[in-house]
Amino acid sequence: MILITRLAQLTALASVLALGACKPANEAPRAGGANAASISDAPDDYREVSPGKPGGTLRLSTSSDTTTLDVHSISHGNTQWLGRILFDCLVYQDEHGNISPWLAKSWDISPDGKTYTFHLRDDVTFSDGEKFDARAVQVNLEHMRDPATKSPLAAAYIAPYVDGRIVDDYTFEAHLREPYSPFLDVLAQSYLSMLSPRQITQAPKSIAEHAIGTGPFVLESYTRDQGLTFVKRKGYHWAPAVTRHQGEAYLDRLEVSIVPEPMIRFSALESGQSDFTVDAPTQNAQAIRNNPQLQMLTRIRKGNPFRSLTYNVEKFPFQDVVVRRAVAKAIDRDGLAWITGFGEYQPKGDFLAANTRYYTPDFKDVLAYDVSEANRLLDSAGWQQRDGEGYRVKDGQRLAARLATYESGAYPSSVAVAIQADLKKVGFELTIDMLPLAQLTERRYAGNFQLLGGGYWHTNTPDGLYILYHSNAVSTPTFIGQNVGGFRDATLDAALTAARQTSDPVALSGLYRIAQQQLVENVPAMPVFESYVLLAYRKAVKGLIFDTSHNTPVFTTVWLDQEAP
């Protein structure tokens, strides 16, 4: 009863706070700044403007392999665009973030917010001939949360789902244990796509390399760490209405190559051996823009920005929020963004992506780079003395920590070294442990670290803050959570819990404002820049639109004005 009362009070407070700046329910806030073009929500970015020409093969490169095509079992970023090639979802977001029909024609939500009734299309089939129906939805939801699937993402997103009932062949009733307003939003993401129920029940191990969906393309071949080939799905005619595309995809084939080396991706594009890369190398961005035959686009993913550091608040010295604030203010985000993005990335000091609904820029400068303030904070926390090497000490103990990280394109070792140098200037000793990814992952989920380097968690809803920072997201012996630093804050928990239990835009605006303020004040992690999608392609590639959930390319509408030689 106390919790319910607290949630009600917080929701009421949030409504009051939001009244002065509320927007219409169908309008998501825009962000400004130097990189505003990359967070455009212009309608034509997300819908087909004119029909294309059928035929041709698009040769595409990407930097890494998802290692499986079971989208329910992974959180790999490439799933965001690969999923739209092979699969479809129940629902789709429009350009404003509102939910619109896809495989579900419509839906009803019970007054208590715990029952969702989906009315499904009756003309959709999987590429193995299986019909898409209510049973397919039930089988997919069970597969997402099945412990054997080992889902790090889809299972968390549907955690409130209890069970479902097949009302008739094309009506499915989903039962939640509590109101969960982001439910429809998360069902629009590629990670929660619909897979063949026959494959899930009869040959689940085959999904990894031979996944079957209802999407606009069919998998022809997949060689791990080398590439994938897709062919047009004949008879496809159920693209989401938001995209304004009717009928089959225009391309006959999609050939995807796994090319980890940035320079090779750039050279292949420049020489015409490749048509498109979904991982345009930032170090070659200017050369791409200077080439009259090439086009480069930069997009921001919704949800959470990229983090340079995550603090383990249960370990020295980060139990002290003052130390966490000081470290955040001692690090030059502009410099880190340049090291990684070569001018393509916009530095970020708050906790929600600027193109996410209910983002507020009010707290973007709270953690701004300020060495003098960092020194003042550390002094106030009792770390006034220095040893012979210039590091701060208190009660005979040096102010120090170890950073656990691994080498990656988004977080190269040079970033860790730059952080180390920045912290040394304020008397903080940072030791860098470059680890194999498997070992880092083990430490991450065991909480065996002081500082963790890198990381982002994309989602199409501000509820991503719950996934990363709510105390319910702290791992337990039976639950793998994403709040790996053990952060707990009662006010944040109350705001994020209340946000899940209301669909009122004014209340949500206020609740997420409270959440964003609590995060910059308590600093469980250190955002560094927005999470970006960087695309480059030949100008012969036409018809490109973007997915509304992920801001990644949709290839159903792409066509070739002329095939590369």
Image (cartoon, rainbow, N blue to C red):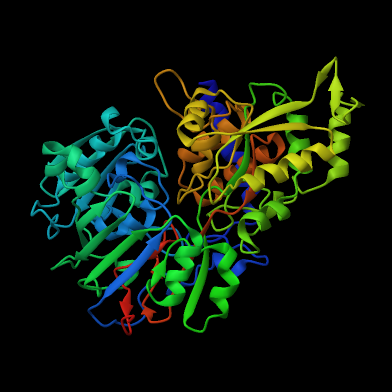
Residue 340 in the figure: left or right of residue 1: right
Residue at image location 22% in from the left, 59% down from the top: 215
Q: Considering depth in this image, is 421 or 211 the residue closer to the camera?
A: 421
Q: Quadrant of the C terminus?
A: bottom left
**Quick one: which residue is furthest to the top in this view?**
395
Q: Position of residue 277 (x, y in %)?
A: 42, 66
Q: Considering only vertical position in the picture, is 110 above or below 221?
A: above
- Number of callouts: 0
Residue at image location 66% in from the left, 55% down from the top: 339
Residue at image location 36% in from the left, 37% down from the top: 112
Residue 87 in the figure: left or right of residue 74: left
Q: Considering only vertical position in the picture, is 428 above or below 207?
A: above
Residue 358 in the figure: left or right of residue 91: right
Residue at image location 38% in from the left, 32% down from the top: 178
* Quadrant of res 29: bottom right
Q: Position of residue 395 (x, y in %)?
A: 85, 15
Q: Considering depth in this image, is 514 or 344 the residue closer to the camera?
A: 344
Q: Considering depth in this image, is 270 or 459 the residue closer to the camera?
A: 270
Q: Position of residue 169 (x, y in %)?
A: 10, 47
Q: Considering depth in this image, is 213 or 170 the residue closer to the camera?
A: 213
Q: Position of residue 294 (x, y in %)?
A: 48, 78
- Asked whether residue 347 is in view, the answer is no
Q: Considering only vertical position in the picture, is 227 above or below 295?
A: above
- Asked whether residue 202 is in view, the answer is yes
**Quick one: which residue is furthest to the left in this view?**
129
